Image (cartoon, grey):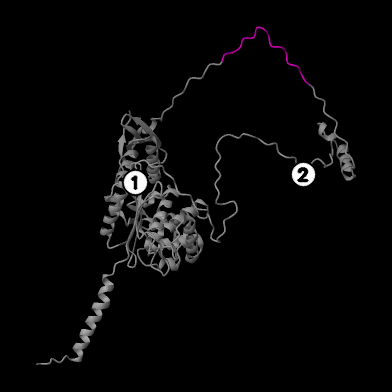
Amino acid sequence: MKVRHISPARNGLFLFAAIWMLVVLPLSAMAAPYAAFVMDARTGEVLHARNADTRLHPASLTKMMTLYIAFQAIERGEISLDTKVTISKNAAAEPPSKLGLKPGQRIALRYLIRAAAVKSANDAATAIGEAISGSEARFARRMNRTAKQLGMTRTTFKNAHGLTQSGHLSTARDMSTMGRHVLYDFPQYYNLFSRKTADAGVRTVAHTNRRFLSSYRGADGIKTGYTRAAGFNLVSSAQRGNERIIATVFGGKSTASRNAKIAELMDLGFRRAPSNAPVRKPAAPAYIADNGQKPKGAGKTIRVSGSVKKSLRPKSRPGAAEAPVLLAAAVTTTEILPDDIQNALQIAQQSVAAPKPAPAAKVVTTRPNARPANLVLARAIPEPEVVTRLSTSGGRHWGINVGRYTSRYKAEKVLLKTALAEMSTLDGTLRKVVRRPQGFDANFLGMSREQADLACRRLKSRNTTCFMVGPS
């Protein structure tokens, strides 16, 4: 029998190949853990869950909390949208995705918010946290306090952007809860998450989730996330008619497969959700400042409804009854003489044991004359109802229509949302809902032809239904 001898060099080659097969290939084939959660956004009812409470890497889903606290800080007056934020070296050094900010650069908070929400910029998210709390570490502690208030029981934040860090973990259930609070607690800012593009100050940025927003009917947010450890994550929300669904995926293998999976989960949610469920908004969290204490007088909203039923008489000033009455005679005169002033000073310097009350003023009453017997009484004539309409002077008798809806409430809601999203061209217009046999038309009136044309073109670029309404 022939025995083949293998050289040491070849042995080493085989050993290297074995190590590659046993270690490198399994690691490259390893996928991030998968988790999914679907809820009825109106009620919070769970419609589907898989590994929903497994603590995983949230990636940039973290920025939902960063933005939530930013909205909260603006509402509480801690900071404003126009506040100029100075970019630190720490924020500028964050890896992509980023806006490309430089150390020492100053930029308005509103642009940082747009960059974090639309482009998922890590440098913008870090700058937001530092601007509100002074440092990213302090901001992370505030994120954890807020998460606890929201009921996110299995979430721990370590940074404002979501890049992989030891202990920075969350769950599909907690991130769905986070998305629901963003939707209902700050509806005035929610339109940020559906913008395909946004002006971020230094440049225009494109939405990281624009493919799904464009392809899935009713989708209007919320946030994507990706790191190697996390995989392709997404918290999405969509509304169809009276139904609104929030679905979350952790551990997608690619953008395309993640979008396909989230569409599948959304369809499942719309099939299982009742068509007419009451909207039970989640309770807003108690406001907690950066020092961990609830500030006095803050965090409480008092709503007054109805008329005042009882008016209380103010109490007398303490000690007013015991105070001596000085210069009582002076108040009854119309002229003050030098001698009177001197006498008054002498009285003031003396100790008065029991001051004499001021003489009561004589009250003179005049009895009115009797009403003449031949007096003719006037009869109240109701004023004619004056009907006003929008002036058509100056050529501002055009308008736009942004859809027809099944109820007045829905039409008014769309008008408000559209006005907030397109303030530059719709500012000063009249929002009006017109009832038709087929439904309720949502109109903006009081525009020139050029203004109406510009507004429609801008809205259509955002996939919003719009057509011009001429003078009639």
Query: For the residues marked 2 and 1, what is the alpha-carbon distance in whole angstroms?
Result: 64 Å
Q: Dot 1, how many residues are within 10 Å of its Cα: few (below 14), some (14-19), or many (20+)?
A: many
Residue located farthest toward the left when viewing the structure as drawn: 1
Q: Percent position (x, y) of residue 468?
A: 31, 36
User: Residue 318 shows which numbered tag?
Assistant: 2
Give the camera-side residue of 78 and 230.
230
The amino acid type, in three-letter code, at marker 1 is: Ala
Quarter assignment of residue 408: top left
Q: Percent position (x, y) of residue 226?
A: 33, 63
Residue at 39% x, 60% y is: 53
Label 1, secondary structure: give it: loop
368 is within the stretch colored magenta: yes
Tell me the quadrant of the picture where the C terminus can be found: top left
Which residue was labeled with disc 1?
273
Can residue 201 be seen by looking at this rendering? no
Give the side of residue 357 with respect to residue 115, left or right.
right
The amino acid type, in three-letter code, at marker 2 is: Pro
Above-or-below relation of 378 to 51: above
Residue located farthest toward the front when viewing the structure as drawn: 1
Instruction: Identify the main secondary structure in magenta.
Output: loop
Give the mark, 2 or 1, whose residue is nearer the N terminus.
1
**Magenta range:** 365-379
Q: Percent position (x, y) of residue 218?
A: 31, 46
Can residue 311 be seen by looking at this rendering? yes
